[in-house]
Image (spheres, rainbow, N blue to C red):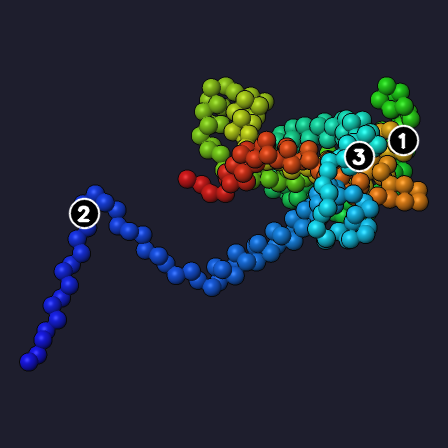
C-alpha cells in the first residue's frame, strides 16, 4: 500500500499586511570592513581616551600602579588646577583674536575668487584655479626662514603692533594662515559653485544685477552649507596651529592657547596627568564648534556631490 504525501496548502498573505522581511546572509567581506573601521576608530580614539582617563587620576596613583591600572580615585581637581595655573582664559582670547579674523578673511576672499573662476567668463580661469590648488602642495616649513626675515622688515604703526613690525604681532600669524588656507577653500568653493543652477544667475543678469549683487545676494546664500563646512575646518586648523605662533610671536603674553600648555611643565618635574587635563580643556572648543555646526558641516560635504 503506497501513501502519497499531500502537498502543503499555499500560504496566503493578508491583504494590506507587509511581507515579513527576508534575513539575508551577512557577507564575510562586509564584516571585515566593519571590523577594520572599528579598529581604525579605536586607534584614533585611544590617545584621547587615555588622556581623559589619566587626567582624572592622581599622579601618585599612576606612578605607582601605571596608567593602565584600575583607578582608586577619580576627580576633576586637575582640570581646575590646569585652568588656573596656565591662565587659559587669556590664551583662549589670543587664539580667538587669530582664528576668527583668519577664518572670516579666508572665506570672504576664497568665495569671491571662486565666484569669479566658476561663474564669470574670465580668460585663464582654469589656470588660476590650478595655481591656487598647486599652492597647497608647497610645504609650509620651507617658508619659515624667508617669512621670518620678511616680517621683521615690514613696518607697522604702534597701534597695530607694539614691536613696530609685523614680527611679534597677531597680524603675522593671521597673514600666514590666510595665505596657506585660501587655495584649498577656492578649490572647494569653485567646484561647489559649478553645481548651482546657471538659470538663477542668468535671471539676475536679466533683472540688471551686477557682479557684486550676484555674488553677495544670490551665490553666497546658496553656498551657506559649504561655507559652514569650510568654516569649521578652517577654525579647527587655525585653532590647533602651534608652529606659526611659536615662530612669529616672541612675547609670551600673545601666544595662543596651544602654546600655553607649556606653562604646565615644570623646570625639573612635569605632572603629565595635569598636562593631560590641560590638553583636554584646550581640545574642547573645537569639539563644541563641530557639534554646533555638525548639520551644516555634513550638508556641506554632501551637497554638490551629485546633480539632480
Residue 140 lies, with reference to residue 2, above or below; the image says above
Q: Quadrant of the C terminus?
A: top left
Q: To which residue does mark 2 refer? A: 14
Kindly report the distance in space between the C-alpha atoms of the residues bearing marks 2 and 3. Answer: 67 Å
* Dot placed on the residue nearer the N-terminal end, 1 or 2: 2
For image coordinates 69% across by 31% down, the residue present is: 103
* Rendered location of residue 23, percent (x, y): 35, 57
Q: Is residue 1 shown left or right of residue 212?
A: left
* Rendered location of residue 165, percent (x, y): 89, 28
Can residue 236 be seen here? The reply is: yes
Kindly report the distance in space between the C-alpha atoms of the residues bearing marks 1 and 2. Answer: 79 Å
Q: To which residue does mark 3 refer? A: 82
SS label for mark 3: helix
Question: What is the residue that sits farthest to the front in this orientation?
Answer: 72
- Observer-side mark, 1 or 2, equals 2
Q: To which residue does mark 1 refer? A: 251
Q: Along the line of sight, which residue is nearer the eye, 261 or 94? A: 261
SS label for mark 1: loop
| Number of marks in picture | 3
* Dot placed on the residue nearer the N-terminal end, 1 or 3: 3
Amino acid at each position: 500500500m503506497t501513501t502519497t504525501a499531500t502537498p502543503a496548502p499555499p500560504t496566503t498573505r493578508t491583504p494590506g499586511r507587509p511581507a515579513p522581511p527576508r534575513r539575508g546572509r551577512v557577507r564575510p567581506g562586509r564584516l571585515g570592513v566593519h571590523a577594520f573601521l572599528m579598529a581604525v576608530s579605536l586607534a584614533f580614539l585611544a590617545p584621547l581616551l587615555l588622556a581623559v582617563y589619566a587626567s582624572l587620576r592622581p599622579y601618585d596613583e599612576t606612578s605607582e600602579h601605571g596608567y593602565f591600572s584600575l583607578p582608586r580615585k577619580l576627580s576633576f581637581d586637575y582640570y581646575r588646577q590646569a585652568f588656573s595655573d596656565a591662565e587659559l582664559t587669556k590664551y583662549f582670547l589670543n587664539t580667538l583674536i587669530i582664528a576668527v579674523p583668519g577664518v572670516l578673511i579666508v572665506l570672504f576672499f576664497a568665495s569671491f575668487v571662486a565666484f569669479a573662476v566658476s561663474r564669470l567668463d574670465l580668460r585663464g580661469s582654469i589656470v588660476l584655479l590650478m595655481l591656487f590648488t598647486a599652492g597647497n602642495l608647497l610645504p609650509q616649513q620651507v617658508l619659515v626662514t624667508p617669512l621670518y626675515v620678511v616680517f621683521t622688515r615690514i613696518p607697522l604703526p604702534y597701534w597695530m603692533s607694539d614691536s613696530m613690525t609685523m614680527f611679534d604681532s597677531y597680524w603675522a600669524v593671521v597673514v600666514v594662515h590666510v595665505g596657506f588656507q585660501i587655495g584649498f577653500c577656492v578649490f572647494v568653493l569653485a567646484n561647489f559653485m559649478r553645481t548651482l543652477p546657471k538659470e538663477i544667475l542668468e535671471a539676475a543678469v536679466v533683472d540688471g544685477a551686477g557682479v557684486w549683487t550676484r555674488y553677495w545676494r544670490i551665490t553666497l546664500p546658496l553656498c551657506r552649507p559649504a561655507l559652514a563646512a569650510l568654516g569649521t575646518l578652517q577654525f579647527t586648523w587655525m585653532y590647533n596651529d602651534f608652529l606659526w605662533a611659536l615662530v612669529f610671536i616672541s612675547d609670551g603674553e600673545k601666544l595662543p592657547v596651544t602654546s600655553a600648555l607649556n606653562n604646565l611643565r615644570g623646570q625639573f618635574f612635569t605632572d603629565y596627568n595635569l598636562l593631560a587635563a590641560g590638553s583636554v580643556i584646550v581640545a574642547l572648543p573645537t569639539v563644541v564648534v563641530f557639534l554646533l555646526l555638525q548639520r551644516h558641516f555634513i550638508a556641506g560635504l554632501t551637497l554638490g556631490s551629485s546633480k539632480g
